[in-house]
Amino acid sequence: MLQQETKNEIAATLDEAAFSATATGQISQNQSFDLADAYAIQAASLDRRHGRGEKLTGFKLGFTSKAKMEQMGVHEIIWGRLTDRMAIENGGQLHRSKHIHPRVEPEIAFLIGRPIERALSVDEVAGYLEGVAGALEIIDSRYENFKFSLEDVIADNCSSAAYVLGEWQHPTTDVVNVSIEMKINGELSQAGSSSAILGNPLAALAEITRILSEQKIIIKAGMIILAGAATPAVYVNAGDRIEGTFTGLGGVKLTVK
């Protein structure tokens, strides 16, 4: 277990790397720390951003495919935090110069309709939703060469950098097996299904209610949950035009400036 001073120092390093768009070395190469330390570092890093006026808007999930869990040697999803300054309007712009090595991936997003303070079952979660939507998440590891350990990535807010939401649909809209395509500059880059997200994105949502309730963290009404990637992430470059289409949910667009 790291001392709080050390956690704060690591948090400051990661925050500065993100703020300046300058990669840093892996923390785990020089410092041994566990998952509890990693989440504490993440929280301390976000506290610095809150101090600059950013507001918490929700949570993002990671490792929501069985294959990725096995690859990383974990048995449950990981999670990070979203803020208002990470939000980009549908059809808006991502400034490439403000990121290190950004990638984009299509996801399913949930809009929470009422507070969640306990673990919910897959059957229960739909009753707590106000809407569902397609989304694009931009991930941008603050580590050199996009390489990290499990603890590293959690401390780095699970690489989350920005997100774009499509139009909210009725909360009962089927999200179990949504066909998803992501095009870059008009050419198909990735195709997949929402079933890649724990077999059912609602299962990922149920899982995060369990994990956060154990940490005494309330998912408030109006918050957004990004349920995890449905396809591999793709590097983006200045000038790229990205479009995600989600059967039954509509489309999401983003331009890289």
Image: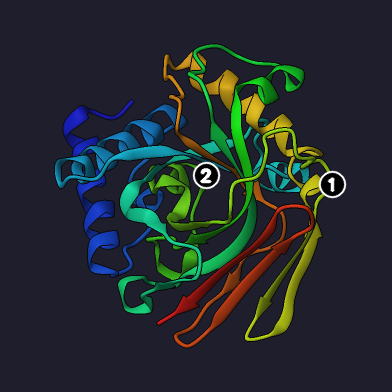
Q: Is residue 88 above or below residue 61?
A: below
The answer to whether 1 appears left or right of 78 in the picture is: left
- Counting from the top left corner in percent of width and height, residue 184 is at 64, 80
- Counting from the top left corner in percent of width and height, residue 118 is at 55, 11
Mark 2 or 1, closer to the camera: 1
Front residue of this view, candidates 173 and 257: 173
Front residue of this view, candidates 242 and 64: 242
In primary-sequence order, the first of circles 2 and 1 is 2
Please name the residue shown 39% across and 53% down the image.
Answer: 29
Quadrant occupied by the C terminus: bottom left
The answer to whether 55 appears left or right of 57 in the picture is: left
Q: Is residue 189 above or below residue 206?
A: below
As measured in the structure, the alpha-carbon distance from the residue carrying label 2 to the one carrying label 1 is 29 Å
Q: Is residue 169 above or below residue 23?
A: above
Q: Amino acid at mark 1?
A: Asn
Mark linked to residue 6: none
Secondary structure type for disc 2: helix
- Counting from the top left corner in percent of width and height, residue 50 is at 21, 40
Please name the residue shown 33% across and 38% down the image.
Answer: 56
**Counting other residues with Cα less than 10 Å from the Cα at mark 2, is it few (<14), some (14-19), or many (20 or more)?**
some
- Counting from the top left corner in percent of width and height, residue 195 is at 81, 45
Q: Which residue is mark 2?
A: 150
Q: Is residue 220 above or below residue 252?
A: above
Please name the residue shown 39% across and 49% down the image.
Answer: 156
**Counting other residues with Cα less than 10 Å from the Cα at mark 1, is it few (<14), some (14-19), or many (20 or more)?**
some
Q: Amino acid at mark 2?
A: Leu
Mark linked to residue 177: 1
Secondary structure type for disc 1: loop
